[in-house]
């Protein structure tokens, strides 16, 4: 009979387990020297050592798990791509990764239902086979579907909402272990709240999405003066399906990206691999010339305009939207009213340059259509999403602390999956339907089983 | 060399940067090649399921930049670093490799078996 280290400690206590196997060395041999498993997010900025890491195979196992662990905190975990501490708990983290793939679809309505653990990267292919596509996608596809909708993850495009805005139905396993189907007609108040829930209402097991017909995209990227781009922004977001700019810190230029639907049949695939070469170039310039700001700016302007190439691509939409990110970073993003976006970005870039802040990863500037979801960052207003990043190996606290007040000045709402310092007292005024969400949460989970310390602070729930 | 170009050359470690790869990258190696047939090792049905829903998303997609399953040449420099480094990168994540390899309930033995399957090599320690 074999015992895991955890089972030994549970059965005999630490001292008993050590004694039974001749002290620590003996115990390590008995446990085949397996390391303690620390859960971390992608950036490494968040971590925890959970007591349990179950991955139920189906909804019945998930419901049984929740019922059998009454009184214990449970946090759902997706791909670990959130930068904020949504997951960490010393109790249980539950993965629905085994519930993955396309469940069903409807050709007439262009709707499709997926298991919630499906990685977004695994949705494009199956959808294409049934003639459908997600109308818009984020610029990475590492997220799981459940994680993406829990945090209102989004791409760019003034006419396109977040992933959550495409949800037309979902199934939730509640704190009582009950399975609850909801949509606009069945439990509509739960449905509306669950479309962006931070995993605080229960565990989502399946999601039905409103898609569109499959399509192809052409991506075009170019380098241009940042001020020219911001001046021309109304036209750029009006004339392009999906438009964004990435501004190089400590310089005068940005990389503009325009993605538009095309009927071109000849494929020009995106370059493989990630962005490490370009980011390493930025790091190299910043490291050597940070203390010579004028040289740094001149070099960055020249290199971006003349030495770096950004080839066009034409392919199926899901192959063009997503990028490989192989340089890890931490991120803060705020959503400001669309019309305030250019002024806010100008102030962010000026602050970074004037204060010579220690960061070199470009900002990201995108547009998202407003929606009607209580906890969505896009609730009630068309939005401009502005992100700042810090290389994972550099401290982000000082950098983000100097930028965050600028976002507050522009009435910004923090992205739920990214770093921010707001608690319930500061968040409530930003969300007109805040109390609607809290009422649903209290009704579904009065004991706070799906709340960790971060979410207790966010929702103002005492432990 | 023109002084300005010399500055750019000094500023940009592009030669080294160009060698860096991406998703699931466990260390230095050349660019990934198209997915070759997986190594001769056979996975249990349980681990095959883990491979299919987690590892395969990068390790069978050359554009991801990850070393491809069955590409012994791409894996060789990673394997040479030793099992401790590979397991550490699997646990903590590395470049675009997600922490815990996107398998939240896997244990160390399973990670070792999956690495051996994809690399076609035995982990020594």
Image (cartoon, rainbow, N blue to C red):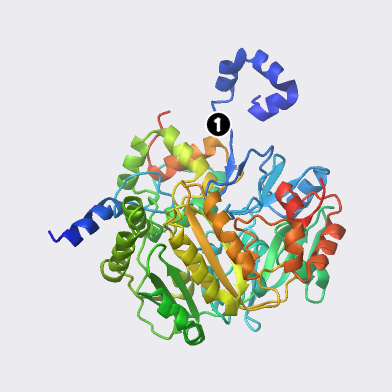
**Frontmost residue, A186 versus B6:** B6
Using residue A225 as the reference point, say whether residue A405 is left or right of it: right
Q: Quadrant of the N terminus of chain A?
A: top right
When the figure is inspected, residue A32 is found, relative to residue B50, above or below; the finding is: above
Q: Position of residue A138 (x, y in %)?
A: 53, 68
When the figure is inspected, residue A128 is found, relative to residue A197, above or below; the finding is: below
- Chain hosting mark 1: A
Using residue A202 as the reference point, say whether residue A142 is left or right of it: left
Q: Where is residue B72 in the image (x, y as percent from the top left)?
A: 33, 45
Using residue A64 as the reference point, say whether residue B97 is left or right of it: left
Q: Position of residue A186 (x, y in %)?
A: 82, 73
Q: Which residue is drawn at 82% across and 70% down?
A: A189
Q: Which residue is drawn at 76% across and 61% down?
A: A172
Regarding mark 1 in the picture, which secondary structure is present there? loop
Question: Does residue A101 show up?
Answer: no
Using residue A336 as the reference point, say whether residue B75 is left or right of it: left
Q: Residue at x 54, y 36 (%)?
A: B108
When the figure is inspected, residue B112 is found, relative to residue A200, above or below; the finding is: above
Q: Position of residue A131 (x, y in %)?
A: 54, 79
Question: Does residue A252 show up?
Answer: yes
When the figure is inspected, residue A5 is found, relative to residue A39, above or below; the finding is: above
Q: Quadrant of the C terminus of chain A?
A: top right
- Circle 1 packing at 10 Å, graded few (<14), some (14-19), many (20+), is few
**Frontmost residue, B22 versus A358:** A358
Label 1 sits on residue: A35
Q: Which residue is drawn at 76% across and 67% down?
A: A429
- Figure disc tally: 1
């Amino acid at each position: 009979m074999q015992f895991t280290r955890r089972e030994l400690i549970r059965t005999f206590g630490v001292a008993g387990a050590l004694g039974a196997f001749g002290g620590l060395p003996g115990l390590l041999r008995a446990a085949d020297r397996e390391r303690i498993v620390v859960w971390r997010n992608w950036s490494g900025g968040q971590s925890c050592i959970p007591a349990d890491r179950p991955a139920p195979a189906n909804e019945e196992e998930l419901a049984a798990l929740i019922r059998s662990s009454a009184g214990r905190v449970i946090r759902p975990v997706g791909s670990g791509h959130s930068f904020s501490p949504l997951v960490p708990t010393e109790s249980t983290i539950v993965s629905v990764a085994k519930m993955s793939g396309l469940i069903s679809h409807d050709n007439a309505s262009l709707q499709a239902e997926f298991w919630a653990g499906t990685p977004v990267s695994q949705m494009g292919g199956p959808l294409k086979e049934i003639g459908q596509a997600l109308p818009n996608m984020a610029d990475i596809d590492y997220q799981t579907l459940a994680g993406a909708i829990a945090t209102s993850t989004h791409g760019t495009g003034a006419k396109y909402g977040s992933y959550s805005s495409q949800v037309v139905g979902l199934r939730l396993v509640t704190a009582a272990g009950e399975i609850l189907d909801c949509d606009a007609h069945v439990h509509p108040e739960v449905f509306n709240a669950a479309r962006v829930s931070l995993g605080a209402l229960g565990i989502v097991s399946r999601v039905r999405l409103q898609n569109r017909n499959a399509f192809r995209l052409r991506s075009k990227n170019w380098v241009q003066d940042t001020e020219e781009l911001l001046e021309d922004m109304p036209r750029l977001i009006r004339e392009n399906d999906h438009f964004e700019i990435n501004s190089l810190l400590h310089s005068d230029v940005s990389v503009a990206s325009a993605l538009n639907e095309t009927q071109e049949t000849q494929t020009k695939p995106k370059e493989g691999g990630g962005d490490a070469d370009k980011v390493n170039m930025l790091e190299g310039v910043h490291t050597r010339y940070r203390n010579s700001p004028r040289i740094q700016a001149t070099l960055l302007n020249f290199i971006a305009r003349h030495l770096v190439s950004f080839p066009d691509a034409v392919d199926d939409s899901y192959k063009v939207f997503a990028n490989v990110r192989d340089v890890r970073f931490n991120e803060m993003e705020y959503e400001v009213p669309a019309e305030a976006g250019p002024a806010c970005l100008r102030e962010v870039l000026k602050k970074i340059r004037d204060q010579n802040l220690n960061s070199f990863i470009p900002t990201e500037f995108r547009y998202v259509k407003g929606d009607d979801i209580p906890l969505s960052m896009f609730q009630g207003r068309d939005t401009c999403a502005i992100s700042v990043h810090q290389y994972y190996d550099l401290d982000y606290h000082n950098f983000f602390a100097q930028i965050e007040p600028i976002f507050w000045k522009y009435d910004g709402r923090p992205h739920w999956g990214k770093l921010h310092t707001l608690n319930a007292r500061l968040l409530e005024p930003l969300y007109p339907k805040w109390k609607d969400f809290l009422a649903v949460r209290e009704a579904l989970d009065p004991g706070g089983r799906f709340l960790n310390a971060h979410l207790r602070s966010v929702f103002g729930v005492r432990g | 060399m023109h002084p300005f170009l010399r500055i750019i050359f000094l500023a940009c470690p592009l030669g080294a940067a160009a060698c860096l790869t991406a998703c699931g990258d466990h260390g230095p190696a050349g660019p990934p090649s198209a997915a070759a047939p997986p190594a001769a090792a056979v996975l249990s049905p349980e681990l095959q399921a883990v491979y299919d829903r987690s590892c395969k998303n990068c390790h069978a997609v050359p554009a991801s930049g990850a070393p491809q399953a069955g590409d012994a040449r791409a894996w060789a420099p990673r394997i040479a670093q030793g099992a401790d480094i590979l397991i550490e990168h699997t646990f903590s994540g590395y470049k675009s490799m997600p922490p815990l390899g996107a398998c939240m309930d896997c244990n160390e033995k399973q990670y070792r078996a999956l690495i051996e399957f994809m690399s076609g090599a035995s982990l020594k320690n």
